[in-house]
Amino acid sequence: MERRIAHLDMDAFFASVELLTYPELRGQPVVVGGRNAAVTTAAKDGRHIFPRLKQYAGRGVVTTSTYEARALGVFSGMGLMKSASLAPNAILLPANFEAYRHYSKLFKAAVAGLAPKIEDRGIDEIYIDLTDIEGDTLDIAVAIKAAVRQATGLSCSIGVTPNKLLSKIASDLEKPDGITILTETDIPTRIWPMPVKKINGIGPKANERLKLLGINTIGELANTNIEDLISHFGRTTGAWMKHAANGIDERPVVIQSEPKSISRETTFERDLHVKTDRAELSTIFTALCAKIGDDLQRKGYASKTLGIKIKYADFQVITRDITVSYPLLHGPDIRRSAQECLKKVPFDQKIRLIGVRAGGLVPLENLKAPEAPAQADLPFDFE
């Protein structure tokens, strides 16, 4: 039986969740990002007053944007200041990750009720193995979309093909609120004309190297001699590129997978110095460790290794890790161990970003003994 693998991608997910709270913004360019953005309420009539992108000052980035904002050139990962030059009157909303996680759980549960073989790929996308589900492929996709909308009030786009690689591409072809069903016979007409960067796994650097070789489309990549690709990219990557461009992907849908680590990080609105901004750094650091603890407890894990990430003002990045004597679960313990990592870090310039990572994850039910009790908190110390 030929596989039927679906990729479901929620449409402009974060922005769409925000529109559930602020339906009056539908049809307008809306950008989510920037921790200083705040919605206020008019005293007279209770009307929401929204900040505009042109009012933003800082170096935050776009978390997501509505399709109306994308039409103006504003996309995820773009600096908010640059975005303001393209869409100065776009509405700017702060991110609400608690709400996004809530709706993520809702849409995944709705899909699982119809098609339980799901691979979770993040907060807003999943792969679904439809191979063993009886019925017409289009009817199944329509039913899944209807279940998602009923559970969340949100739309999604679905691509269904024989494998994960093609389905990832297909789900983006009819956005928003679309369904795309492709077979191997559709590859020359629907896939090959697309730019090579549309293949998940070919990033900006590889894309530029391919351009230098005169390879711009997936079709051109598919028809390139495999030995030429191997000579430029190595045997593993070169062979993968050739197979991917020809729509070959045998990866299964992974129903369950254990996370390797849980991390949190934050980029500051301005560079901070350990001497003049110690109190602010302490507050941020404590909050990151507390969130890691919350994440671990919510997901049912403890951590046996703890690490930190520091990005300096000159964009140099360093990391430090520590292995602990007992699995960590609580924020204060995480903070204490992360602080040990700080002692290994030189702080001779300002800091742009700080992050905390919990690794060596152990399911709580596998612990042979209760985790050690949470220790008292420590003052933040960079020395």
Image (tube, rainbow, N blue to C red):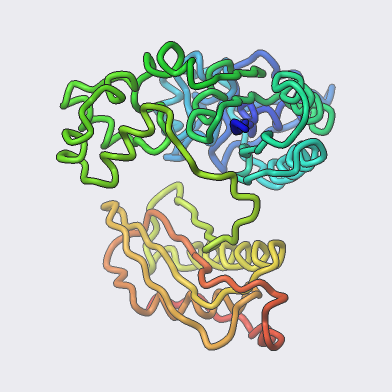
Place of residue 274 in the rendered image (x, y in percent of width and height, measured from the top left): 38, 67
Quadrant hosting residue 69: top right
Place of residue 327 in the rendered image (x, y in percent of width and height, measured from the top left): 59, 80
Q: Quick check: 243 left or right of 186?
A: left
Quadrant for the N terminus, please: top right
Is 91 or 163 nearer to us in this picture?
163
Residue extending furthest toward the top: 189
Q: Quick check: 43 left or right of 265?
A: right
Is 20 or 187 nearer to us in this picture?
187
Vertically, is 165 above or below 253?
above
For image coordinates 52% across by 25% down, the residue present is 53
Vertically, is 24 above or below 75?
above
Quadrant hosting residue 117: top right
Is 263 or 232 nearer to us in this picture?
232
Quadrant hosting residue 277: bottom left
> In this view of the protein, can residue 7 be seen by the observer?
no
Quadrant for the C terminus, please: bottom left
Place of residue 268 in the rendered image (x, y in percent of width and height, measured from the top left): 45, 51
